[in-house]
Amino acid sequence: MKRHLIQGFALMLLAALAMPLPAQAQDGKSEAIKVHGRWTIDVRNPDGSLASHHEFDNALISGGARALAGLLGKFYKEVLTWKIWLESPANGLCDPGTVVCEITERLGAGSPGLGELSVHVPTGFLFGEFPLGTVELKGAVNVTGGGSIRAVASVLALCRSSACLPTAPDGTQVFSRHTLAEQITVEPNQVVQITVVFSFS
């Protein structure tokens, strides 16, 4: 299943790169291929009620460009895992002694739990199944210490060979990152739910 998702992601990227682009935009400037990230963050209380809702966009950064170049040029064999980082200005948001809450892709069977991430490539059918052009990440994490979230990032752990292990990827690249204009306040024992949708134009 995971290999099908990775293959679908690679095919989607190749299709985006192969799309014809207009020579010039209406303002006279040439257009480029773009990667968009739409984030939704819900903070929920222990009883499940919604404490706050946030939506914002971010874009590819240099690490993401290197990751795409490595995948398309076959420098990397596959995406080992996706990760989401929630960055705090102080230690203890999710774990004592660290400013980053890390949500990692679940590689085993079953639904993801707290601190785990699912990756989905929506597909359609036209003479066979094909990716529709987006990649969706969903995950949640329990906030033990409380505090605030000042930035978010999506991260790729990459492999150059099939012998690559989840605990020892051949490369890690921050794919996208966004510093929040207003930090998201979270209280102890609240749950932060994240959805990220990547699209291409």
Image: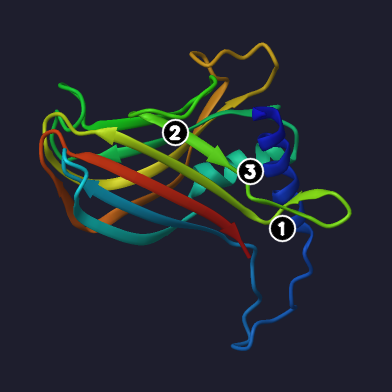
Q: Nearest to the eye among marks 3 and 2: give it.
A: 2
Disc 1 residue crowd, few under 14, some 14–19, many 20+, Cα 10 Å: some
Q: Quadrant of the N terminus?
A: top right
SS assignment at label 1: helix
Q: Amino acid at mark 2?
A: Leu
Distance from Cα at disc 2 to Cα at disc 1: 25 Å
Distance from Cα at disc 3 to Cα at disc 1: 12 Å
| Residue at x-position 17% and y-position 39% | 190
Q: Nearest to the eye among marks 3 and 1: give it.
A: 1
Residue 201 x %, y %: 63, 65
Q: Nearest to the eye among marks 2 and 1: give it.
A: 2
Task: Give the labeled residue for mark 1.
Answer: 16
Task: Give the labeled residue for mark 3.
Answer: 68
Q: Amino acid at mark 3?
A: Leu
Which disc, if any, is residue 117? 2
Vertically, is 147 above or below 131? above
Q: Quadrant of residue 160?
A: top right
Q: Quadrant of residue 85?
A: top left
Q: In the image, 20: left or right of 65?
A: right
In front here: 96 or 5?
A: 5
Along the polypeptide, which appears first: circle 3 or circle 1?
1
